[in-house]
Image (tube, rainbow, N blue to C red):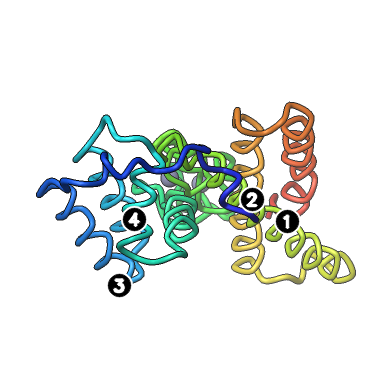
Amino acid sequence: MDMQTELPPQAADPQQLAPASEKVSAALTDLKQAVRAKQAEAICTAYQQLKEANPSSAAAVRLTLATQAIGSAAVGIIVSAFAHRHCFMCQHGATPCRSCDGTGTLPGEDLSCPRCSGTGTRPCTFCNGTAWADAEMAPRELRRAVTQMQLGHVKEELRRATEILCTLKGKSLNTLPAKQRRSAVHWLRKIQARLADLSLRDELPAEQRGRLAEDAERMDVCIDRLTGF
Ligand SMILES: [Zn+2]
Ligand SMILES: [Zn+2]
């Protein structure tokens, strides 16, 4: 993807770059360290600090400063950090089901828990099961590129999930160990949540959003086949 097309067209004004305040320098130092350590969360925080250090500066100025500090791949690195930012309330988009304490069965009985369909987990209510940080938290100038990157990842995950499910079809689902079925359901639920989330993003054309919503809905069939232990 050509990152340049996602950015505001105006060139950075050197006047605005000139007297780098202490806060700007500190944010750039943090950014450099975070990139070296490959820590997505720290990269996001440092970029936001850069914005807060000089809120009136244009996005192009911030991105030019970041490029000067960490090199020509700066925009891609920062976009990737925001695209991979995690929900801090869950692990992989799910939290243990409270009804069955995460076991998938009701205490003292051999029945599947009806609340979680025997999977032991429920979608995280904070991120709606996407495991992503709220898209609105990404800086406006990067949102389009972040959405495009997440879309690419989800399409790839969907392709892999479809491939794996096709091989499952040939086997008897009843013989598939419960643990494997559960992890397949968790995975599919996360992909479904991500498709649904992307279908609500303003950055995407309405037609594409409609298709994403349909893809998300269609996944119910696969998920239902794997639940109901
Ligand atoms: Zn349960
Ligand atoms: Zn979450």
Q: Depth-wise, is mark 4 or mark 3 nearer the camera? A: 4
Q: Name the residue type under label 1.
A: Leu
Residue hosting label 4: 66
Q: Quadrant of residue 205?
A: top right
Mark 2: amino acid: Ile
Identify the residue position indicated by label 2 in the image. Answer: 191
19 to 204, vertically: above or below: below
- Given the image, on which type of amino acid does mark 3 rest? Ala
Earlier sequence position, callout 3 versus callout 2: 3
Q: Can residue 201 be spotted in the picture?
A: yes
Q: Are marks 2 and 4 in contact (CB under 8 Å)?
A: no
Q: Earlier in the sequence, mark 1 or mark 3?
A: 3
Quadrant position of residue 182: bottom right
Tags 1 and 2 in contact by the CB under 8 Å rule?
Answer: yes
- Location of the C terminus (image quadrant): bottom right
Give the mark toward the camera: 2 or 4: 4
Find numbered disc 1 in the image and state the secondary structure of the residue it sits on.
helix
Asked if residue 167 lies left or right of residue 134, the reply is right
Between 33 and 137, the one lying in front of the other is 33
Q: Which residue is mark 3?
A: 37
